[in-house]
Amino acid sequence: MPLEMSPASTEHWLEVLEAQGYRLTAPRRVVVEVIAQTDRALSPLAVFDIARIRYPQLGLTTVYRTLEKLEALGLVQLVHQANGCHTYIAAPAGHQHLLICEYCGRTLFFGGDDLGSLIDQIERESGYRVHEHLLQLTGTCPGCHTD
Ligand SMILES: [Zn+2]
Ligand SMILES: [Zn+2]
């Protein structure tokens, strides 16, 4: 099962944004770089704190709007946290599932889908037709569990 580290190609993201006619101002670019280059799921506030070091005049609204734009383009995805907060991580290419550390937010994606027979069974029993699924596993990464 291939485990993929997430940091995406920042250059690719910038090309996609430019192709969409998105004006890459300096503060937007810093936000894009922060979220493209981390393997940790980050809240908008965490992105703000990191990006502000590189661009002190950055506004929080720019962070929210840039993250929303990246999500709309499929470049980042929302991660649901146990505490009800949302964080963002660079989206994988294609259909993959998320493995996330509940302590530090480090994230891996994995393929390999054995959900087919479970979904078949659920469809039979419920009468629903299932069109898609999201799978997120939460635990502790090698750096965070002590045993
Ligand atoms: Zn961890
Ligand atoms: Zn799947």
Image (tube, helix red, strand yellow):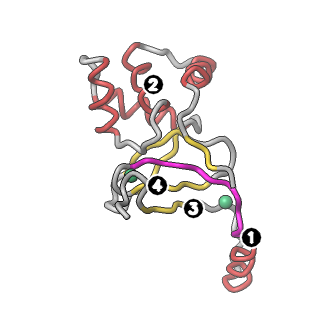
Q: Nearer the viewer, residue 144 or 14?
A: 144
Residue at the farthest front position: 147
How far apart, in angstroms, are the residues tagged by discs 2 and 4?
21 Å
Residue that carries the numbered disc 3 in the rendered image: 135
Task: Indicate the quadrant containing the C terminus: top left, top right, bottom left or bottom right.
Answer: bottom left
Q: Nearer the viewer, residue 51 or 107?
A: 107
Kind of residue at badge 2: Glu
Q: Give residue 79's position: percent from left, percent from top.
A: 45, 51
Where disc 4 sits, the SS reads: strand
Kind of residue at badge 3: Leu
Q: Residues within 10 Å of mark 4 (few under 14, many from 20)?
A: many
**Residue in the picture at 36% in, 30% down:** 63
- Against 42, residue 122 (above or below) is below
Mark positioned earlier in the residue sequence (1 or 3): 1
Mark positioned earlier in the residue sequence (1 or 4): 4
User: Image quadrant of residue 74?
Assistant: top right
Kind of residue at badge 1: Gly
In the rendered image, residue 134 lying in the magenta stretch gets the answer no
Residue at the farthest left position: 56
* Residue 33, numbered label: 2
Kind of residue at badge 4: Ile
Mark positioned earlier in the residue sequence (2 or 1): 2
Mark positioned earlier in the residue sequence (2 or 4): 2
In the rendered image, residue 113 lying in the magenta stretch gets the answer yes
Residue at the farthest bottom position: 125
Residue that carries the numbered disc 1 in the rendered image: 116
Residue that carries the numbered disc 4 in the rendered image: 100
How far apart, in angstroms, are the residues tagged by discs 2 and 1?
37 Å
Disc 3 under 8 Å from ligand 2? The reply is: yes
* Residue contact at pointers 1 and 4, CB within 8 angstroms: no
Range covered by the magenta-colored residues: 105-116
How far apart, in angstroms, are the residues tagged by discs 3 and 4?
11 Å
